[in-house]
Amino acid sequence: MASQKVLVDTNIFLDYYLNRQSGYLPIGEFASNFIKDTLSCKYIICLSEIVLRKLQKQATSFDLFDDNVLQLLRERNKLEEIKIHYELVKQAKVIMEKNKVPFNDALIALTAKKLNIPVITRDKHFFEELNYIAKVILPEEL
């Protein structure tokens, strides 16, 4: 069976690296299980250029990449880097203004739509304002 492609938002990696909690929910554990499932060939993680840049910026401030899961995903061919096209940037600006959401979120949703894959995220903008563009899933729902 082929691995399912999913577009992953920055917050899932931050949940993993920082082993975050949200109230009583162990969201770091959920993210870790998702990454383990990916490494065991259940998923292929697609990351847009925007998410990769955000992760690299966060990594510097939090010193996150000691275990460098991104490199491991690359080595196992479980990571696909997605280039952003100018046409999607133009569309994202319109959606950002229309829905009052961050530009990056609009761009990620449009990228997922273009690739016909779901977005894995915890960001409320995807569930509340952008769910008409692309399917949105929490990592524990996979």
Image (cartoon, grey):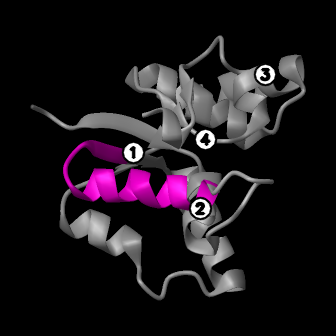
Residue range highlighted in magenta: 27-45
| Mark 3 element type | helix
Which residue bears the numbered disc 1?
46
Earlier residue among tags 3 and 2 = 2
Q: Amino acid at mark 1?
A: Cys
In this view of the protein, can residue 30 be seen by the observer? yes
Q: CA distance from mark 1 to mark 2?
A: 19 Å
Q: Nearer the viewer, mark 3 or mark 1?
A: 3
Which residue bears the numbered disc 4?
121
The image quarter containing residue 69 is: bottom left
Q: Amino acid at mark 3?
A: Glu
The image quarter containing residue 129 is: top right
Q: Nearer the viewer, residue 88 or 68?
A: 68
Which residue bears the numbered disc 3?
128
Give the image location of residue 116, x and y in percent. 40, 20
Earlier residue among tags 1 and 4 = 1
Q: Nearer the viewer, mark 4 or mark 2?
A: 2
Q: Amino acid at mark 4?
A: Thr
Q: CA distance from mark 4 to mark 2?
A: 12 Å
Residue 44 as seen in the image, left or right of residue 46: left
**Residue 48 forms part of the magenta stretch:** no
Residue at 19%, 49% (x, y): give it.
Answer: 41
Q: Nearer the viewer, residue 62 or 47?
A: 62
Q: Say whether marks 3 and 2 touch (CB < 8 Å).
A: no
